[in-house]
Amino acid sequence: MEENLGRKIYEASCFINDIYKQVQALLLACDAAFDRAGLVPISNEVELHRARNIYEAGAWSQRAVGRIYVPRRLDGEGINAFVAVEVHLRPKSATQAVLVLAYAEPSEGATPPELAREYRDGDWLEDLLSKGAPGQTEWRGGRAAHDKHLSLADELKLKSWSLTAFTDESAVEQVLVAKLREWATQKLK
Amino acid sequence: MFAAELHGKLGDGTNAGDRMEDVLTSNVFGLLRCLESPDLLVTWLKQSRPAVDGASLLVEGPVHSADIHFWQRVRAREVDVLVLLRGPQGLHLIGIECKYESGKSNASRDDSLESAGSSDQLSYYMDALGADALPSRPYRPEEVHRRSLLYLTGHAAMPRDALEVSLGSRRERSAIDLHWLAWRELAPHLPQGSGSGGMSCLLAQLRQVLDRRGLATFTGWKDTEPQWRRPSQAQFFHPTRGRPFFAGMTAPDLPSNTTFWRGPSRRGT
């Protein structure tokens, strides 16, 4: 038996624990930033959350996490836009861990539970970036181009950043909210 | 000061959640009380948000001093922290209800506390503080120009539902504001590393406590790697004849060139 095997396993678990703590902090930063921007999460199914037991065997093999948000104040006629955030530790579209931000205009009458259910069961949105040119960080397309991902979205816009691009919590807020404002403005035009 | 907490000596068992909450409250506000200047406390309090959109901020204008009192009796219950902010306008009384992992401690229907006030914990404190119903007040009611209740929690996003229920559960109509603040908003204002001794060292340790509790903010992504590596000179697959299978074998590098993060290609499965 390798004499240092126990220590190496311990160090590996510390490494994994550190990665998960960092992802958790990043997701909470997104939650806080979106809350200040008036967006609330509608899905919990795929979140890496404080309550999640990272010592479960299943948690060790998780490579990505995602969540959907909608505007806090609904106008009674359904939602007119929603946002998704995914963190991929081993993305198909890049060689380093990335955060993917998505903005979509849902099909008429789509409800938050329907969106949450479809997002949970569909393919990762990051896959759409991997189908383009190598290193592609932005994507947009109509429903036919992403029917296996979110068929309830009429139009979908994506952008990804390397996780190292976010130096602190304010950088997360500035970058993500600025991009959402840009997309929302484009919608108004 | 924080050694027992940083070394995981607080343990679990009966009422572990309450104890963790009280120890956190004591650690954070106990240290803030030792500071000569109220600046750090005020800076943190300024990150709070009113429960009602458009309402006044918790801290407006200069603050000359801040007194911190623990577990003051308020009618039949105890509020975790009472902060007395003194400024040019007089005294701003702030009650703080601290939560770590639990929600509000509302009284049950048959609880004797209910007969003395709202069963909602925050509503109860708002009514009681608004009426200066503290058996041993550390202030004079006539010097108070404003009263507030602060809900301090481990959330990243404002727990709006809980706050709205509290606002709607009040039995008295005395003037008092309700605000929310996150523990994690304190961490960015504390020094990183080990500190340079004295109070700086204690503040740095407090940051470590918050980090250990999952109450720190995101401070940038660090591409960490485990400390161990496969020996570069050695072949990974050695002949195993005549020697134990695991001899000389080490775990593969993580995570850059492996498929360590194997997982389902679809979400939620």
Image (cartoon, rainbow, N blue to C red):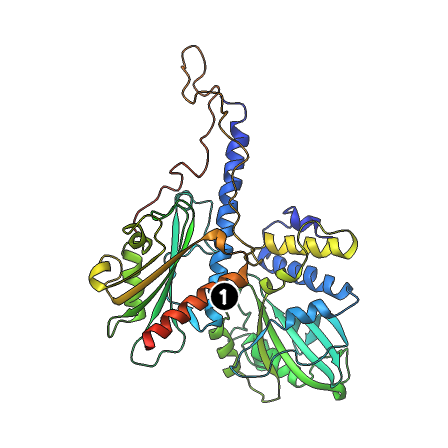
Residue B107 seen in render: yes
- The number of callouts visible is 1
* Residue at image point 59% right, 50% down: B12
Relative depth, front residue between B5 and A88: A88
Which secondary structure lies at badge 1? helix
Q: Give whichever of A16, A33 is nearer the camera.
A: A33
Circle 1 chain: A
Name the amino acid, label 1.
Answer: Gln
Q: Which quadrant of the figure has residue B98?
A: bottom right
Question: Residue B123, located in which quarter of the rendered image?
Answer: bottom right
User: Which quadrant holds residue A189?
Assistant: bottom left
Residue at 41% in and 57% down: A47
Q: Is residue A39 left or right of residue B33?
A: left
Can you name the residue that lies furthest to the top here? Answer: B242
Residue B54 is situated, as x and y percent measured from the top left of the image, at 53, 83
Residue B198 against residue B256 in the figure, above or below: below
Pinpoint residue B59: horizontal percent, then vertical percent: 65, 78
**In the displayed structure, does residue B105 sit left or right of residue B68?**
left
At a point 51% along the width and 41% down the height, the residue shown is A15
Which residue in the protein does label 1 denote?
A174
Residue B26, given in percent of the width and then of the height, sits at: 69, 61
Q: Residue furthest left?
A: A144
Residues B24 and B221: in front is: B221
Tell me the crowding category of disc 1: few under 14, some 14 to 19, or many 20 or more residues within 10 angstroms, Cα based: few
- Is B250 located above or below residue B102 in the figure? above
- Left or right: A140 in relation to B168: left
Vertical relation: A155 (above or below) B256:
below
- Indicate the position of residue B173 as horizontal and vertical percent values: 58, 89
Residue B77 appears in the figure: no
Foreground of the two, B146 or B124: B146
